[in-house]
Image (cartoon, rainbow, N blue to C red):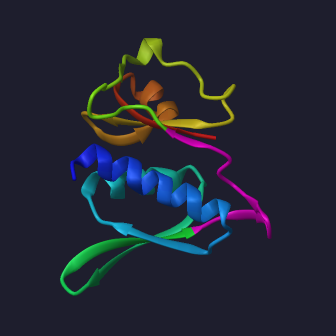
Amino acid sequence: MTKKFLISNSISRIYNAQQMLHSTVVIEYSKLIYGITQTMLSEGYIKYVKRLKINNILYIKIYLKYIKRNKSVINNICVISRPGKRVYKKYKKMKYTYNNLGISILSTSKGIMSNIKAKKMRIGGELICKIF
């Protein structure tokens, strides 16, 4: 399994767990996925992120966030960059996601960050996913 398939698999597991109103979800560990979850945490889309080690294999346990008992914070997540088609954006060409109600997560030379932070720092990068 390549890194991009791991990313799309992890993002869909987070989205599906949120739609089924689970409190937590466990996904495979990768530095890139851990950076994505840290960005989601700093932007307020999830409650808490914890690294687990089970049988010498690293996992990430994500505590999901809800507005009310049955209303999830994440309405939609879509993966943009795929192994066959990578999407890169310059900071000048970055548009707001869902009228600035959502975020885009980018992989930049300075690390994984949201489009808002990347615009402030004036750097572009590979567009990984959009969250609304």
Quarter holding residue 124: top left
Residue 118 in magenta?
A: no
Residue furthest to the top in view is 92
Residue 38 in picture, x, y percent from top left: 43, 56
Residue visible at 69% across and 25% down in the picture: 99
Tell me if residue 17 comes above or below residue 123 in the rendering. below
Q: How many marks?
A: 0
- Between 99 and 25, the one lying in front of the other is 25
Left or right placement of residue 25 versus residue 69 in this view = left
Tell me if residue 114 comes above or below residue 25 in the rendering. above
Tell me if residue 127 comes above or below residue 29 in the rendering. above
- Between 93 and 29, the one lying in front of the other is 29
Residue 23 in picture, x, y percent from top left: 61, 75
Residue 18 in picture, x, y percent from top left: 62, 62
Quarter holding residue 121: top left
- Between 87 and 1, the one lying in front of the other is 1
